[in-house]
Image (tube, rainbow, N blue to C red):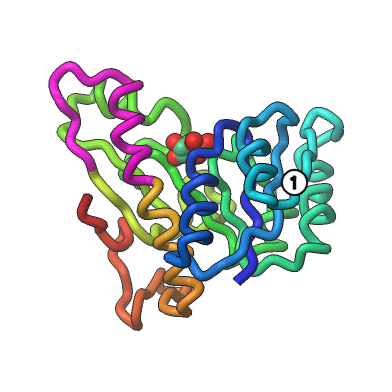
Amino acid sequence: MKLAVLISGGGSNLQSFIDQCNSGELTAEIAVVLSNKANAYGLERATQAGIATAVVSHQEYADREAFDQALVDTLAPHKVDLVILAGFMRILTPVFIGAYQGRLLNIHPSLLPKYPGLHTHKRAIEAGDSEGGATVHYVTEELDGGPPIVQVAVPILAGDDEGSLAARVLEQEHRIYPLAAQWIAERRLKLTPKGVSLDGELLGPSGQRYLS
Ligand code: GRF
């Protein structure tokens, strides 16, 4: 299975894919890492791992659709099976989403459907929630609204701030994101009109619960 990983920043999730591809836990190959920012540290991680990189700067395009078409054109020669959004901080349009329908995953740092959008950890702490977490989901045109695949929860502890909670969640993101991709590699996961199924069983509205 050939992957493209799209990033905008540090790329710690990208690193977990690189490590799991190297260890064989994830039976896939990262064909290309694409960033919309030339200075994203994740590009260095890719280069160190001998993976091809590409930069497509959103600032060079008149609108979201033109940017998305450039993403499609850049990925096309790599012929990837699955696109992994890993901290890619651009809202995608149907131009991109349509080209990779059913083959496009994102990880969102909240227990979806709670807290789509930004500042998820801050919002969970301010709401007095006892748990935070992350969700891997298929991408649809609804922002952070596509069908969930796998979700992990972590406790929110007294004295937590955005940073401490984010770090606790990120550690779990690094487990569940490659796991979801591996289920796809093993053809265990299906996106059906009724929702996502794993090994033939329809998953609930938050996806499979992963125990941290
Ligand atoms: C993660 O928190 C992820 O959930 C969100 O963006 C962040 C990316 O972190 N979508 P990294 O670049 O993978 O370290």
Which residue carries the number 1 mark? 53
Question: Residue 170: where, in percent of width, then height?
Answer: 37, 38
Image height check: is 210 above or below 55?
below
Which amino acid, mark 1? Thr
Question: Residue 172: where, in percent of width, then height?
Answer: 32, 45
Q: Quadrant of the N terminus?
A: bottom right
Q: Nearer the viewer, residue 37 or 120?
A: 37
Q: Dot 1: within a 10 Å radius of its alpha carbon, few (fewer than 14), some, or many (20 or more) residues?
A: some
Q: Nearer the viewer, residue 165 or 135?
A: 165
Q: Nearer the viewer, residue 141 or 186?
A: 186
Looking at the image, which residue is at 63% across and 48% down?
A: 49
Can residue 192 be seen at all in this image of the molecule?
A: no
Residue 123's quadrant in the figure? top left
In magenta, the rendered stretch is 154-173
Magenta segment main secondary structure: helix
Looking at the image, which residue is at 65% across and 56% down?
A: 4
Taking the magenta stretch, the answer to whether it contains residue 209 is no
Can residue 135 be seen at all in this image of the molecule?
A: yes
Question: Residue 62: where, in percent of width, then height?
Answer: 86, 33
Looking at the image, which residue is at 32% across and 37% down?
A: 169
Taking the magenta stretch, the answer to whether it contains residue 157 is yes
